Image (cartoon, grey):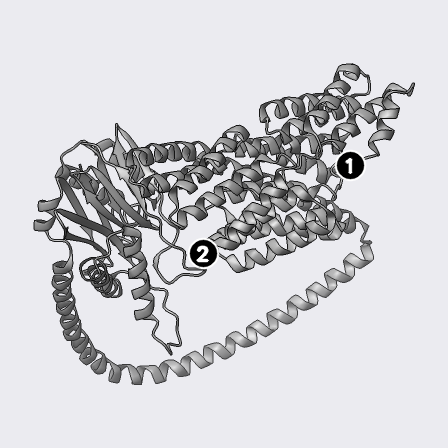
Amino acid sequence: MKKFYTSIVLFFISLSISAQSPVVDSLKRIINSNSPDTLKMHAYYELAYEYLSIDLDSAQYFAETDIKKYGNNKNKLLVSDAYAALGTVFGYKRDFENSLLNYKKGLEYLKQTNNKEAIAKSHFNIGLVYYYTSKYELAAEEYVQSLKLLEEIKDRKTLPTIYSGLGGIYKDMQSYDEAMRYYQKAMQMCVENKDSMGIASGYNNIGTVLDFQGKLNEALEYYKKAFDLKIRINFPRGLASTMNNMGIIYSKQKKYDEALACFTKALSYSGPNQDKISQTVSYDGMGMVYYEKKNFSLALSYLEKSLALSRETGSKMDLLSIYEKLALCYAAQGNYVKAFNIQQLLIKTKDSVLTAESSLQVNEMTAKYESEKKQLQIENLNKDNALKSVELNKKELQVRQQTQQMIFFAIALLLVSLLAAFIFRSYKQKQQSNEIISAQKAEVELQRDLVQTKSKEITDSIFYARRIQHALFASDSILKKHLPEYFVLNMPKDIVSGDFYWAAAVESGERESFYFSVADCTGHGVPGAFMSLLNISFLNQAVIEKKIQSPEIIFEHVREQIITSLNPVGSEVESKDGMDATICLFDFKGMWLRFSCANNPLWLVRDNVIKEFAADKIPVGMYHGDQKPFTKQTLGLRKGDMIYMFTDGYADQFGGTKGKKFKYKQFQQLLLANHKLPMQDQKKVLESTLNEWRGNLEQVDDILVVGIRV
């Protein structure tokens, strides 16, 4: 169960990251007294923050009153405080539009001051709003602005919060190594600052990355550390997020009772605080648990609650998770029309959030910042070295020059001696070599004849193996019988291939199920061919002998057989062999397709638009981490749809004028431009384009592309 939930606590820091709240009664007395306006402004500001965890409407009232009464005050810093307080209130209410508006107004006032610390924190607040509305490139831009200012004034107290923000962006973009790097930087500084709240959030953040990397037990340990620390520092909002994360882990481990207990407990923490994002995650998690328990009606009721809340908060990452589960529930109930409509919303939302351009812009911004920082360090170091060299007196320079000259003459003398010894030794060796060479010539000629004979025998055997392998591939007769229109482009790197395409037709009552798979086994050539034969036999066993019908369960069976066969009891070396593959179950009468993808995606061209159905980032075989289940996807078909399945060989081929990879984007454009051609013409275009691209370069991998027109 994939969960797009940020572990950064939505704790919009204004100009004071952890303000100390005075007693409410004392603040109200200041407001009603004849105290100076400056003191009253502070009182309204502090009251707004005091009420954040009690009554958001009251918090909004005090912040708005502060602005109405004192918005024209000459003290720009205090006016910006008031706008920041109101921005924070709207942030807690998940009214991100008004939150952003007020934070930006506060920043306008701050820019009229020279308070770099306050300006930096204001940039972070704005970035946090962009983050929660999934505008990652804008969030990263604000975070980097904040980083530059904080490092300029050497403020190490606030820096961990910025690093955590960048970690959150990279986590949502699934760049887990970068996310972990920033989270660990933040954690290290929180430990140095003895910041308990920051350490607790750090445990939570690191736990989420470990979760996404499949290290569930390690993630759970970090969540427990975060929970225990948050209990000690009395941080209820943080408790809700951590309890939700623990529920997600238990759900993935199929400990459904423990998961439900965690989600219910999280609701009790988030409810009093009106934390809609935490509530969204709780209901989402409960929905998935009931889906796994096959109680689809109850699952849908919780998911609908989660969907309504996520639309209020505007969190696109939460919407992605909920759409994914809703589609599964509707498909499980047999409501494929609704499941398809939800899946279209999922694809549309995903395309608007996790774009390649966004990822590129974020990476460029952070890389540019790191580069500028290193360049500044180098320039400062060069300046220091220049000053030191000027301070050296002439006498020290003369001593250094004399020493260098002595070393030079000593080295030169040593080199001359070594050269003379080498020349003499080479002369003696040449005499001995001439005597040996004549004897070796006859032996080499004999060995060459033997090698040529053996090579021919091996080549003949491999050609015979190719005949056996092709006999096990899906035959033209079965494909012509069950597919309306199709083409197969199969270009092995060597005589035999690690790529294969397989098909099977199984009668079930009055219906006939047609299965089709495209796979890329570990390795190519002879090792890849052996793996392909093994995997074809496992597929036949799953579908024909075991009569397994669902695509993802077929992959589960094949994975189990691969691991068991290649890692027998007592084996000293753990085999990581397997395959990346796509398997489809077609029903051309009912016009639907069920499929599962392991590392290789499936592409659909419809209405001149190409859509990608993402693959599970796991192979069918042994891999590091827990053995995650494969995902079943369902697609309603239309007349004229083009389905493309493929291995990575086409996109990874080097060529062109610069000798670079062809890449998937160019591959998509090629398919889209030619998808209306007859099937065999499409195949010819793909083949000729690749040969032209490759030129004189060697083919680097097996290539397999299959197109099917509905």
Location of mark 2 (residue): 254
* Disc 2 element: loop
Tell me the crowding category of disc 2: few under 14, some 14 to 19, or many 20 or more residues within 10 angstroms, Cα based. Answer: some
- 81 left or right, relative to 593: right
Question: Mark 2 against mark 1, which lies toward the viewer?
Answer: 2
Determine the residue positioned at 72% across, 25% down.
58
Q: Position of residue 236 (x, y in %)?
A: 67, 43
Q: Kindly indicate the quadrant of the structure image that contains residue 524.
A: bottom left
Determine the residue positioned at 67% across, 46% down.
378
- 517 left or right, relative to 510: right
Tell me the number on the disc at residue 413. none
> Looking at the image, do the residues carrying marks 2 and 1 touch, with CB atoms under 8 Å apart?
no
Q: Is residue 464 above or below residue 700?
A: below
Task: Pick whichever of labels 2 and 1 is earlier in the sequence.
Answer: 1
Q: Position of residue 616 (x, y in %)?
A: 37, 49
Tell me the number on the disc at residue 19. 1
Q: Amino acid at mark 1?
A: Ala
Q: Position of residue 150 (x, y in %)?
A: 72, 38
Q: Can residue 358 be seen here?
A: no
Q: Is residue 273 above or below residue 75?
A: below
Q: Amino acid at mark 2?
A: Lys
- 63 left or right, relative to 681: right
